[in-house]
Amino acid sequence: MKIMIIQVPYHLGKRTVGMGAGPIRFLQTNIIQNLLDHGHSLRLESITLDEPFKDEIKAISRLNILLRNKVQEGVKDGYFPLILGGNCNTCLGTLAGLNDPTIGIIWFDAHGDFNTPETTPSGFLDGMPFAIATGQCYEDLWSQIANIAPIKEFRSLHIGGREFDPEEQGNLEKTQIQVVKTIDIKKKGLEESILPVLTQFQSKTTKIYLHIDIDIVDPQEAPGVDYPAPNGLSLNEVESIIKLIAGRFSIEAAALTAYNPSKDENNKTLNTGVRILKTILEVKNPL
């Protein structure tokens, strides 16, 4: 398989700071050699701001335009784009690079990432990327990056959330976005909670962008995040859901985000992330 790994080692526009160090740390493991040993064709890219940092919005816009261009190049050459991002806002450049108005989003995250400037309690822009990608806010930012309309709500699915801000929860409930919370998965089990939703989702799209914020995994297995949320999914559960998704949809691109090495414990989160990456690539190219 032809794989393009794109590093975006930034946290809110700042390079290799906090979560921005995560992408580099992943590539210091044996994952690259492992892919080469298995006969994959590999292309490594890294996004670097080519102008001085001015403010957060401008930096995010520029980073995602650069990412969009790399994703477009990779797709054109037949590569599968695998994004290692600091922040979740890399979804904007990835979706823009795929440039497919019919694509769906499956978003794994402990948090909603669905605040807007009107509802956010913190003003944290990285609490809004799922909302931006689905057209809820920052339309100007999206239009600077993408040449397509935002992704339709009904083609969007959020899995594994367990910490939503009250107004953010209200925002989600007003949309056509499907939500499967961690509590639902724990109560009903994977088959009863996930399979009916995926079956229904198949009527809305056949191709997806798979977004995985590593805080989807319980802090016992992934402590190296800025906003740990207890009572999360196990790594095995996340891997099982990815396999269920791959059996029903074409994964056009995938991202792993939000790993902060400075908060890790004995490389637990690093090893968890490597396993998730390997699972994504295995389901894309089953032996």
Image: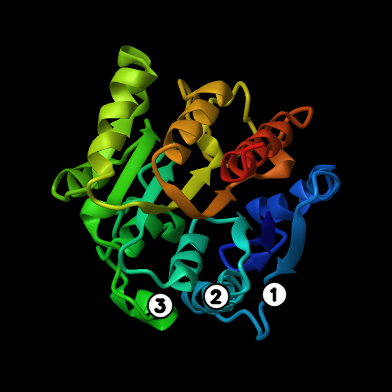
Q: Residue at x 13, y 48 (%)?
A: 174
| Relative image position of residue 1 (x, y in whole percent) | 68, 54
Q: Which mark is residue 146?
A: 3
Camera-near label (2 vs 3) is: 2
Label 3 SS:
loop
Q: Which residue is mark 1?
A: 48
What amino acid is at disc 3? Ala
> In the image, is residue 128 above or below residue 203?
below
Of helix, strand and loop, which one carries label 2?
helix
Considering only order in the chain, which callout, 3 or 2, is on the residue closer to the N terminus? 2
Pair 3/1: label in front: 3
- Pinpoint residue 211: horizontal percent, then vertical percent: 48, 49
**What kind of element bears circle 1?**
loop
Residues 270 and 111: in front is: 270
Q: Which residue is mark 2?
A: 72
Which residue lies at the image location 85% right of the left edge and 45% below the top edge? Answer: 37
Q: Residue furthest left?
A: 174
* Residue density around tag 1, few if under 14, some if 14–19, many if 20 or more, within 10 Å: some
